[in-house]
Image: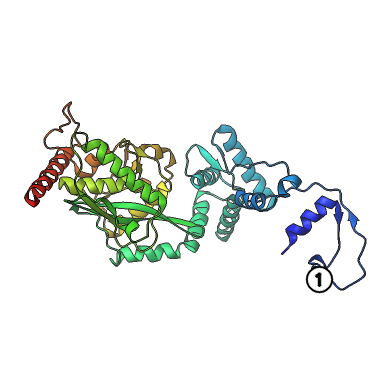
């Protein structure tokens, strides 16, 4: 306590006062005080950006004392030179910490871990403390087996053990799917329901889990009723995503006549706060399915935000989301038709665990990349979205044609009711 005030006073006065805690608060009773020591030093403060902002906003003297600021990046471009430097850092750490040397595949596994920390194939993590921790743990497992080098399997062992120590909550959540406390279908075709994906952060562990989004459409003028917002469980970004959906529906289906409908949409079995727009495309697919009465295959989970033009935009946590849904599908039984639909922009972020990669190679699990809503709804339903002609009409046997027909029917019935009321 009060260290900042003491440091600030010493740097301003260029004098170091030796005093007890009470004296520093002006409550001392001793009349004997040592002479202050002349202070001529340069001080470098290292901390988080949030701490910097706190000091800057709440202490006017902070910028006068510390006039130079430098940002340290937590990532670097992955290229031949940086990979070489990574290998040199690994070798230097092993020598300084008296660790066993790494095999070439062991070094490659550490580099891959550095990529996964950033979730980008083109970048490497600069959080060297985490790298050192993995090296030390891998050394422990290698020595336990009387190995002379740290091979790839010991790096994987260290990573798996680290994951195991931090994933208790993840295991409990997974049990709830296995025991069907949380209901998730990964095999049927259902109208107005899509499996969305979310990421949960518990301490150092981040993991993905699916949630059912359901939409019901009916006559009315309420527009989109966001049940999370009505129950005060929705954040501002999620609310913005809902408004974007209204813009998309108006742009696509209300150029020649007004929309006259009500849509009720919610995350099922969600009792905490919901925020972010990464499920906005999922919500839109549920709405389109409900309006067209075309079922969506529940084996394909969806992530990605959407804009008013119908373009699918990048999201965060793509690896955790894919792996989380894969684990649920594996528990309930892989059918060969299951997978995850992601934005094209997130392909570069794919750094999946070996089990998922193997399942994709064997075509037991699939990863679909999309750029537009039209592409996504066709993958989910197996029915073309449809492209409007110059008169704004969609071709028969398309999703958008069925949506258009229902919206026209809602509008006609609304006018009929108004006439009867007169």
Q: Quick check: 24 above or below 343?
A: below
Q: How is the image coloured?
A: rainbow
Q: Quadrant of the N terminus?
A: bottom right
Say which of 120 and 132 sits in front.
120
Give the residue displayed 91% in from the left and 66% down from the top: 33
Give the residue displayed 66% in from the left and 53% down from the top: 58
Q: Position of residue 18 (x, y in %)?
A: 86, 63
Instruction: From the viewer's perspective, tell me whether residue 109 is left or right of residue 355.
Output: right
Q: Label 1: few (<14), some or many (≥20) within 10 Å?
A: few
Q: Position of residue 345 (x, y in %)?
A: 39, 37
Say which of 40 and 187 sits in front.
40
Residue sitting at the far front: 422
Q: Quadrant of residue 72?
A: top right
Say which of 161 and 189 sits in front.
189
Q: Which residue is mark 1?
A: 27
Q: Quick check: 333 above or below 223?
A: below
Whether residue 125 appears in this view of the structure is yes
Instruction: From the viewer's perspective, tell me whether residue 343 is left or right of residue 41.
Output: left
Residue sitting at the far top: 390
Residue sitting at the far left: 420
Instruction: From the viewer's perspective, tell me whether residue 54 is left or right of residue 63.
Output: left
Q: Position of residue 355 (x, y in %)?
A: 38, 50
Say which of 144 and 17 sits in front.
17
Q: How many marks?
A: 1
Secondary structure type for disc 1: loop
Q: Position of residue 230 (x, y in %)?
A: 32, 58
Whether residue 355 appears in this view of the structure is no
Give the residue displayed 81% in from the left and 51% down from the top: 11
């Amino acid at each position: 306590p009060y260290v900042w005030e003491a440091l600030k006073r010493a740097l301003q006065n260029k004098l170091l006062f030796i005093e007890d805690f009470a004296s520093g608060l002006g409550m001392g009773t001793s009349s004997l005080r040592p002479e202050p020591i002349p202070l001529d030093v340069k001080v470098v403060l290292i901390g988080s950006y949030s701490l910097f902002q706190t000091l800057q906003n709440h202490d006017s003297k902070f910028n006068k004392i510390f006039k130079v600021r430098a940002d340290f990046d937590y990532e670097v471009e992955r290229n031949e030179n940086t990979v070489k430097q990574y290998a040199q850092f690994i070798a230097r750490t092993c020598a300084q910490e008296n660790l066993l040397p790494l095999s070439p595949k062991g070094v490659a596994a550490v580099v891959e871990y550095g990529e996964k920390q950033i979730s980008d194939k083109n970048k490497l993590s600069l959080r060297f403390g985490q790298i050192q921790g993995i090296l030390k743990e891998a050394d422990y497992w290698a020595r336990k087996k009387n190995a002379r080098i740290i091979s790839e399997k010991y790096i994987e062992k260290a990573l798996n053990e680290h994951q195991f120590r931090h994933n208790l909550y993840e295991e409990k959540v997974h049990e709830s799917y296995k025991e069907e406390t949380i209901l998730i279908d990964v095999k049927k075709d259902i109208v107005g329901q899509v499996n969305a994906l979310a990421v949960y952060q518990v301490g150092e562990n981040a993991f993905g889990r699916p949630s059912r989004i359901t939409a019901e459409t009916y006559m009315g003028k309420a527009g989109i009723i966001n049940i999370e917002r009505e129950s005060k469980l929705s954040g501002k970004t999620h609310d913005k995503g809902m408004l974007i959906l209204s813009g998309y529906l108006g742009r696509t289906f209300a150029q020649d006549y007004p929309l006259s409908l009500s849509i009720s949409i919610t995350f099922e079995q969600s009792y905490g706060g919901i925020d972010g727009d990464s499920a906005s495309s999922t919500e839109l697919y549920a709405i389109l399915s409900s309006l067209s009465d075309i079922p969506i295959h529940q084996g394909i989970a969806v992530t990605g935000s959407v804009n008013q033009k119908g373009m699918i935009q990048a999201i965060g946590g793509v690896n955790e989301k894919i792996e989380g849904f894969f684990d649920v599908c594996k528990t309930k039984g892989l059918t060969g038709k299951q997978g995850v639909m992601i934005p094209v922009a997130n392909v570069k972020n794919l750094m999946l665990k070996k089990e998922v990669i193997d399942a994709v190679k064997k075509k037991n699990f699939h990863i679909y990349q999309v750029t537009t809503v039209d592409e996504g709804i066709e993958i989910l339903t197996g029915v073309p979205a449809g492209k409007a002609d110059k008169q704004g009409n969609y071709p028969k046997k398309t999703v958008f044609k069925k949506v258009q027909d229902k919206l026209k029917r809602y509008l006609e019935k609304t006018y009929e009711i108004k006439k009867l009321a007169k």
